[in-house]
Image (cartoon, coloured by chain):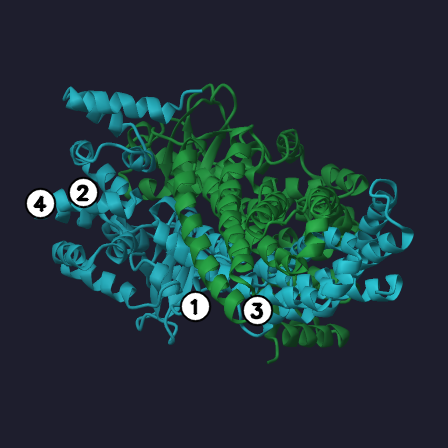
Chain colours: A cyan, B green
Amino acid sequence: MTDPLETLKTSIQTLAESKKYVTLRDILSTMNAADIASLFEDNMPEEIIPLLYRLLPKELAADTFVEMDPETQQLLIKGFSDNELKEVVDELYVDDAVDLVEEMPANVVKRILSQADAEKRRMINTILKYPEDSAGSIMTTEFVELRPHMTVEDAILHIRRSGINKETINNCYVSSKDRKLMGVVTIRRLILAEPEETMEELMEDNIISVNTMEDQETVAQQFSKYNLIAMPVVDGENRLVGIVTVDDVLDVLEEEVTEDIEKMAAIVPSEKPYFRQSIFDLWKSRIPWLLLLMISATFTGIIITGFEESLAKFVVLTAYIPMLMDTGGNSGSQASVTIIRGISLNEIEFKDIFRVMWKEIRVALMCGATLAVCNFAKLLLFDRLTILVALTICLTLVVTVFIAKLVGCTLPLIAYRLGFDPAVMASPFITTIVDAISLLVYFQFATRLLGL
Amino acid sequence: MTDPLETLKTSIQTLAESKKYVTLRDILSTMNAADIASLFEDNMPEEIIPLLYRLLPKELAADTFVEMDPETQQLLIKGFSDNELKEVVDELYVDDAVDLVEEMPANVVKRILSQADAEKRRMINTILKYPEDSAGSIMTTEFVELRPHMTVEDAILHIRRSGINKETINNCYVSSKDRKLMGVVTIRRLILAEPEETMEELMEDNIISVNTMEDQETVAQQFSKYNLIAMPVVDGENRLVGIVTVDDVLDVLEEEVTEDIEKMAAIVPSEKPYFRQSIFDLWKSRIPWLLLLMISATFTGIIITGFEESLAKFVVLTAYIPMLMDTGGNSGSQASVTIIRGISLNEIEFKDIFRVMWKEIRVALMCGATLAVCNFAKLLLFDRLTILVALTICLTLVVTVFIAKLVGCTLPLIAYRLGFDPAVMASPFITTIVDAISLLVYFQFATRLLGL
């Protein structure tokens, strides 16, 4: 299986070494910005990258620049003349320019801003002042703004004159003189309308907008709930300040999901992709929870120590501790992960807590019973335990699964209600709690049934 | 904190009971389809729903219908006259009609198809024949198709004449006479171009398309990689058969992420939201892995039984088994979840396996060392163990973390290479393996250091 990207990379390197620039230019011009960026980042020798980049047609070059990772961008900027840098910055959309500025070290940022024209610099600074992960920070300030009295003809003229630089003109926004958002006109509607109709007549005024300070995750949820491709962003006085487009929402969704998954696995989230995290970064994001959970596991140790003498009499019981704990952990994480995902998809709310508990209780009893019956048969037939010992283990199993599911489904909802991130209440956390409880139950049953 | 939706629901119910239909119609007309649908689904009494639905303006009614869950849709259809059903079906976009047909029981499907006109029925059937989760199954066959020789004026006329029914006209596709895909023209380009320019001159021919049989997850990845809002779908001969739009991709992403998260938590994925799954559904999706993992935990039992006599001599060692196992499980799942997510974001590939291992080995040693040092202090100072016992526990800890991270990072990559879903190689699976290994290591150290 040869990787086509690998083949392409080799040919391009060979061509670059033998200075076949015309051929290279021809090849690269047929490619997509995203593909060229992947090509550059995939272990391409550092000295070839600026050379190849300079072969790209101007617009493609800017698009490719946006797609590259910060390391490669910095490498290129280092080699740029001021003029070359200005060319790139001029081609960048404002929101992409902001992303760039956020990733670069201070001295590079200074160079970039000095090359941007005054208007762009102002727009970049506007977006930069919004808190990270807010709607304001992911919006662009380049969009088409129309006035209610404009006719279709006026609007098209306006778009033609100004629209060529706007990131998306699929949705045009209508605002009053004091910039209050009034409605939206899709380009589709414009093209299908008669030339003399006005924006006021055409626009949809039942419009979904978002405040600059709204969390980006909420913005993304609105996009998927209302099937949007763009959404206007307004300030506290309902003045139109920018728009968020669906391509940025896709990135937000990816980022937020990764964050949730990391939290569920007891990792402190990082925004960098795996290979861009140093081993120290990885250590820093993993050690806090490992330490905390290790210390919490002290409780299980204390419980076992408390029953040390009884265990010494019935050593066989020790052999089933891992099975009980793992089953408890798995049962609990099934419930908690289901609920956490339901919360983040807005399918489950805090007010559903009793409905959820009632459901989980019944599922827990069914799962517990199934596992206990299978295990009971195995303990008697294969492990040849006495009925009483097998009963101790299987009763503990049922109770453990029951408690695990109950803890697993309630903790995320309670965390959510208290304003914490429910994702933290996933497998590792639940396991630690369920471990302790199931051991207590185990020893209780053992004391009663086996007379320890 | 009163929920505004709750308040609105109460007023609407009261208005419905006092038969204030004009007021109701006015309120509902100002609302979004998605919001009306949530309102209907949120415990609204069943008899009121059809009544309210009939108050909606025709187009809003169809939009609302699409947003509702299958139960509510079925409830409405049951009460529809053939005429009313026809009105809804006529307003539905083809891809939404397909979704509806897929969710309804056979007798309802028959009624729906009999009310669709011949053209729509043909289109529905075309899409239905593609396998679930393929690009073909999520595409729509309603799109604007242009010919290369058309001028901008022709194109706009063509769109005006036919486009009003098309789900999206933001991207128009140019195809040859035998329907081979040639290029794409955005509506933005059309509106900015001169009337006499031809499609051939305007179109972007470096076009990203997808085959009907391609997996929907791949399609979604392309959207986010290339920042698309629509993508043409072609058959084996590169003939244009449909388009996928970004709103459907958002749904696909949500679905695929939920599936991955469920797999990571040892749940057999289900497509239904939580509250639409019966307790039997939930049991069915949770019990297989619980059973399998319970049986695998037998190994840990066997290992402990093998060292039963030694354990009886040094009962204190038992108290630290849960801590060692949990820390191993958590360390392993941190690594595996990171790698699984990296694979699904296309950041990590199989060829990176040695790079990943080298990184994880170093992180594992750093984490292991940190944990061991903290634990050693705690064991000596608080638990008052002897140095040799504390050493046994802490050395095991280092080795366990090391093995957990190594197993955690390699198994998902190997699964991926072999064509299995890496998501299955997450926490529960890794925990079971690491449990057994860490116990073996524990008893080895105990034998050597404590002379058991």
Q: Secondary structure at mark 3?
A: loop
Query: Marks 1/3: CA distance?
Result: 49 Å
Q: Are marks 1 and 4 on the same chain?
A: yes
Disc 1 or 4, which lies upstream in sequence? 4
| The C terminus of chain A - image quarter | bottom right
Seen at 75% across and 59% down, the residue is A312
- Residue occupied by mark 1: A214
Which one is in front, B326 or A401?
B326
- The picture quadrant where one finds residue A9 is top left
Q: Residue at x 38, y 68 (%)?
A: A212
Depth-wise, is mark 2 or mark 1 nearer the camera? 2
Graded by Cα atoms within 10 Å as few (under 14), some (14 to 19) or many (20 or more), the crowding at tag 3 reads few
Which residue does the numbered mark 4 point to in the structure image?
A81
Of residues B170 and B299, the one nearer the viewer is B299
* Residue B142 seen in this snapshot: no
First-in-chain label (4 vs 2) = 2
